Amino acid sequence: MTNQKKSAKLAWRNGTIPVAIQFDDPYFSVDDGLAETEHVFLAGNDLPERFKDGFHIAELGFGTGLNLLAAWQAWIASGQTAPLNYTSFEAYPMDIPAMRKALSNWPELEELANKMLTRLESDDFKINTPTLNAQIIIGDARDTLPLWQGLADAWFLDGFSPAKNPELWGETLMQAVAEHTKPLGTVATYTAAGHVRQSLASAGFTVKRVAGFGRKRHMTTGIL
């Protein structure tokens, strides 16, 4: 999984937490990234309670793959037998060694992480197993999402901070998210920025500000 022209440029905080140099923003919570994912993206989308055959998660910002692994783990634990569908949009893919280093923070994910990374090493950005069908679409989501033919049941909006990565939070892109969401589909994000909530509301989501994770007082959820 390499993209030398637009690969992620990283620094490491405490030797374990990757920080995107371009956006000066860590990829996950300095407190506990997995717990953050479970609170914001799983619970924020009422998962795993809503899981069913054919369920499709879409995501803005693949990053380390932590969100995918958390969802995949929850999918298996919930007793699903068909594969989870997962589509992620990523402009600056992280290389495999960096992903492996970041994910080593969670030994409980090691088995699934190894499966994911082994398949991503083939450089086709697809992961197909009996319990997961995933694709990472490389490029600016403002260009790639409108061309996507899928519809998601749940969205993980996980771009870098809106103040530092505004292109992933604009009204036009949130409209594209809505257009690629099934009726009664949901969104969840760690940010409670007013303009993000307004963009989601303008796109047709009923938006709520709810309790955030850790040091973040609030986050945002929505239903179409």
Image (cartoon, rainbow, N blue to C red):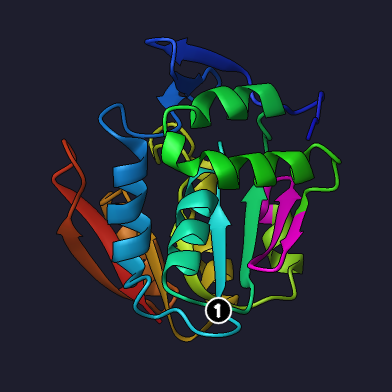
Query: Is 30 placed above or below 155 here?
Result: above
Q: Residue at x 52, y 59 (%)?
A: 72
SS at mark 1 in the image = loop
As drawn, is 13 to the left or to the right of 175? left
Residue 171 appears in the figure:
no
The residue sitting at 40% across, 67% down in the picture is 187
Residues rendered magenta in the picture: 127-142
Is 56 in front, or is 108? 108
Q: Amino acid at mark 1?
A: Phe
Dot 1: few (<14), some (14–19), or many (≥20) neighbours within 10 Å? some
Residue under pointer 1: 55
What predominant SS class does the magenta segment belong to? strand
Indicate the position of residue 25 as horizontal and vertical percent values: 42, 26
Closest to the observer, 86 or 4: 86
Q: Residue at x 30, y 26 (%)?
A: 30
State whether residue 28 is above or below residue 61: above
Q: Position of residue 8 (x, y in %)?
A: 65, 25
Q: Position of residue 186 (x, y in %)?
A: 40, 74
- Near-viewer residue (93 or 76): 76
